[in-house]
Amino acid sequence: MAKPSVEQVKAYLIGLQQSICERLEQLDGKAKFKVDTWERAEGGGGASRVLTAGKVFEQAGVNFSHVSGAAMPASATAHRPELAGRSFEAMGVSLVIHPNNPYIPTTHANVRFFIAEKEGADPVWWFGGGFDLTPYYPFEEDVVQWHQTAKNICDPFGEDVYPKYKKWCDEYFFLPHRNETRGVGGLFFDDLNEPGFEQSFAFMQAVGNGFIEAYSPIVERNKDLDYQDEQRQFQLYRRGRYVEFNLVYDRGTLFGLQTGGRTESILMSMPPLVRWEYCFNPEEGSDEDELYQRYLKPQDWLNLNG
Amino acid sequence: MAKPSVEQVKAYLIGLQQSICERLEQLDGKAKFKVDTWERAEGGGGASRVLTAGKVFEQAGVNFSHVSGAAMPASATAHRPELAGRSFEAMGVSLVIHPNNPYIPTTHANVRFFIAEKEGADPVWWFGGGFDLTPYYPFEEDVVQWHQTAKNICDPFGEDVYPKYKKWCDEYFFLPHRNETRGVGGLFFDDLNEPGFEQSFAFMQAVGNGFIEAYSPIVERNKDLDYQDEQRQFQLYRRGRYVEFNLVYDRGTLFGLQTGGRTESILMSMPPLVRWEYCFNPEEGSDEDELYQRYLKPQDWLNLNG
């Protein structure tokens, strides 16, 4: 079994951040990413890239971070006591994109690697990641293509991979207090170690590389669609759900905020403009209603007539 | 010692909601509150009153709720095992006001009563509550008057009361990930039982009645001040901190969302419009900077030269 190579994963992640930012700049056609590099007192640091006020993207944030420490934080070893006292490294690329046009979905993607080491013992490591889509005015074609791309990424790794990580995504991105999914899902995986380093790393790369292939065609198809203030207002309202999910439930966000992560990088996921409206309910049969009735419920998008 | 009277507390709270809404309508001069009453399957219900798109208030939400149950929820007895198996009633009035004008602070107030009973045992009960102020462009006069009113409310109940509950407020409304207080504080108390029912109830009423006396003059003084888009944008940006606090830290909000409370009533605290901006920092020496440098740090507002 291949030995885990931290440097190899890190080099991949840095390249991935670069290539995703380049593709997003091409898609936007106007705005460019700005970079902030930062260091963490306890070890490691990162580079946050943000594009704002673009032609297509109201805001896109793509983070790379690589943090390390001499001892695992207590909060992280509560569930894995075997890791107590180990040194650790955690690295990943995480992104959230908020487009201007309400016909383009918001999206999030993340790939990450974790390793805990101790003199004289085998390292403990795993990969995690995924991507998910949050439309405001969904088109079935987009949702099906998104899931088809996800499935194509997974299939070489086994036929149970897509259904398993698709389900995990539906379960993770769910708002119990709204009884809604955050969007139409995608892939979510964590603790991936069992296939060995090479295969696990290969899968994480397939997900990382596949994200922009899944998202780009949706942006291209919808970026020039006309919309009115009504659609914009609904988009701003629905962005509130994104905020609710990320601040109330998202484990990465909460862990980051509670353990002294770089707040501005963690909260790059917050939409640039958001609206709340007491007791808003879409009119029955409207486009807005269709989002709730049809799309914000887990379902088999690749077998709609199944 | 007087016996706790649930009906007496409930009648007070219903009257308080009514009188605060009347005063807010007078202050607004244009918009009126709308009322939604709701019931809870497990027992009890409430009345949510919301005023939107007013002349002075962009949104004001004033909730009354009275929930009851045959057995305490497990989450509530983890820290007080002596309450397991008891029936309970919880009631309160809670409000959040988001004004249009950035020179008027946002404010929050809450008074509440909790009682757990069991055949053949003394009831266990306590009061809680408080109010706090979140200015965008603070005036020292307003902040001092706010705290002076808070102190005047507390002083008849003992000279240690104001300092104790003022400190609790500063500690509670604090955002560790921003290293900022939510605003300039006020009063926060909980578990109030020791002085006996009559005195504890009297204190809760003093806080409930005192809130509008503390807030009204600030509204009156500032509601006609001119402001530009720059001030509005800063207000929208700072409202993001309000969202961050309420969704990440506020115990009432999280408890409500996690235990199947009425989501729309709980999230009436969310501002109608909010902005996030990556790495925003006010210009040194600006009015915006003064908020951070001078006001968002706990201090003795009644002894500024002390």
Image: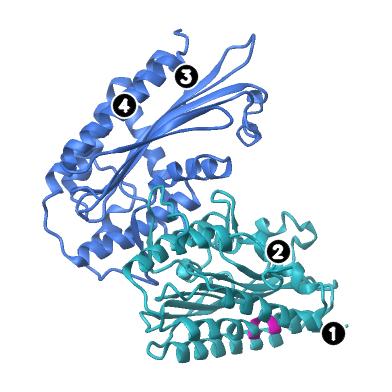
Chain colours: A cyan, B blue
Q: What residue type is labelled 4?
A: Leu
Q: What residue type is labelled 1?
A: Ala
Q: Mark 1 or mark 2: which comes first in sequence?
A: 1
Residue located at (20% from left, 54% from top) = B101
Q: Residue furthest right?
A: A1
Q: Distance between the residues labelled 1 and 2?
A: 27 Å
In this view of the protein, which residue sits in the foreground, A164 or A50? Answer: A164
Q: Mark 4 or mark 3: which comes first in sequence?
A: 4
Q: Mark 2 = which residue? A: A168
Q: Distance between the residues labelled 4 and 1?
A: 69 Å
Q: Mark 4 = which residue? A: B16
Residue A47: percent from the left, percent from the top? 51, 81
> Alpha-carbon neighbours of circle 4 within 10 Å: few (<14), some, or many (≥20)?
some
In this view of the protein, which residue sits in the foreground, A108 or A200? Answer: A108
Residue B272: percent from the left, percent from the top? 34, 54
Q: Which mark is residue A2?
A: 1
The correct choice, above or below, for B63 with respect to A82 in the image is: above
Write down the chain letter for disc 3.
Answer: B
Q: Which amino acid does label 2 sit on?
A: Trp
Q: Mark 3 = which residue? A: B194
The correct choice, above or below, for A188 with respect to A199 in the image is: above
Q: Residue A242 carries which label?
A: none
For the residues tagged 4 and 2, is the chain the same?
no
Q: Is residue A207 magenta?
A: yes
Q: Which of marks 4 and 2 is in front?
A: 2
Q: How far apart are marks 4 and 2 (CA)?
A: 47 Å
State left or right for residue A260 relative to residue A124. Answer: left
If the image is split into quadrants, where does the C terminus of chain B sit? top left
- For the question of whether residue B144 can be seen, the reply is yes
In this view of the protein, which residue sits in the foreground, A85 or A282? Answer: A282
Magenta stretch: give its range: A205-209
The correct choice, above or below, for B232 with respect to A7 in the image is: above
